Image (cartoon, rainbow, N blue to C red):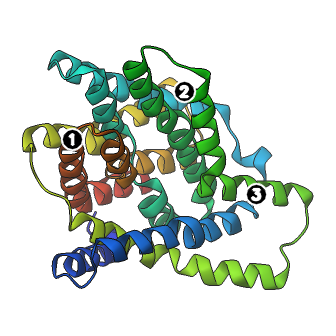
Amino acid sequence: MLAVLLQTLPFFAVIGLGYFAGRRGMFGPEATAALTRFVFYFALSAMLLKFSSRLDLSEVFDWTFIWAYLGGTMAIYLLATAVALLRARGLEEAAVEAQCAVVGNVGFLGIPMLVMLLGEAAIGPVMMVLAVDLIVFGSLIVILITARRDGRVSPAVLGSVGLGLARNPMIVSIAAGLAWSATGWAVPGPVEATLDILGAAATPGALFAIGASLATKNAERLAVAGWLSFAKLVLHPAAVAVMALVVLPVEPFAAAVMIAAAALPVAGNVFILAQHYGVAPHRVSAAILISTTVSVLTVSLVIAWVAG
């Protein structure tokens, strides 16, 4: 546990530096937004493109893996939804809280950290987790909120969701990389060098951006935020572990990566959606802040367990 904690600490130290810069006014909201866009559209996309161009889709894609992750995640999603509805929060708030309980920071934190700690073999499983989060749960929150407001799920909404997925640079990068890999051609030297340069900026840029964004978060509604953080950091990886190790046994290393990815703190894009729709943004903000802080220990503990 201590050895893994020492390995994960540098990642959280960079997050801490970003937080310090944000709190001190050295890195304001506009600078944070600009850095986040750079990482999202360029650095992280370059890293994903480089990684996926080296993968064989037939070796990476695994329905058992997908169903195990989807099953465990959906169980916690439904639990968080039920808890919110029992508190009479309504479907919109329930959808946002459920999103907090299952969607982790796989893109900005999980990919760089898990690949570095668990090796390049973790790339395929992490990408499958990211794809399920983006395609299934990223779409579900939009569909539920718009359906609640409009009283139905219109073709326009589904079209908008599909268009959003098609424009997501992470999905585009993974798809483009896998398509290139299928050709069997090597990535041209200058292109690979460009991807290496941009990709090298993804890890520090993403971690610093996470910290800087946390500087604007507040810790209101601690009871609910604490519950959502517990669901994300403890219940989500536990449910995924049961599915991947007992119900639908997955190849051991892939299962380990899946469980570690499920243990990641609440993703920042949940706050963006909550703010966009005007549904419980302060609650989400607090959940992100608390889960990211506590995850210094919980993520290290989970990685130490699965690595062992």
Residue underneath mark 2: 248
- Decide which of tag 1 and tag 3 comes sooner along the chain: 3
Q: Residue at x 30, y 21 (%)?
A: 91
Q: Residue at x 85, y 78 (%)?
A: 188
- Decide which of tag 1 and tag 2 comes sooner along the chain: 1
x%, y% of residue 247?
A: 49, 24
x%, y% of residue 237?
A: 36, 40
Classify mark 2: residues with Cα within 10 Å, few (<14), some (14-19) or many (20+).
Answer: some
**Viewer-side residue, 58 vs 78:** 78
x%, y% of residue 158?
A: 59, 28
Q: In this view of the protein, can residue 147 be seen by the observer?
A: yes
Q: Residue at x 14, y 20 (%)?
A: 87
Residue underneath mark 1: 230
Determine whether the residue tagged by mark 1 lies in a helix, strand or loop: helix
**Viewer-side residue, 153 vs 49:** 153
Q: In this view of the protein, can residue 3 be seen by the observer?
A: no
The correct choice, above or below, for 78 with respect to 192 in the image is above
Q: Using residue 167 as the reference point, say whether residue 225 is left or right of it.
A: left
Give the foreground label among 1 and 3: 3
Give the foreground label among 1 and 2: 1
- Amino acid type of disc 3? Ala
Q: Residue at x 18, y 47 (%)?
A: 282
Classify mark 1: residues with Cα within 10 Å, few (<14), some (14-19) or many (20+).
Answer: some
- Amino acid type of disc 2? Leu
Q: Quadrant of the N terminus?
A: bottom left
Mark number displayed over residue 176 = 3
- Amino acid type of disc 1? Phe
Mark number displayed over residue 284 = none
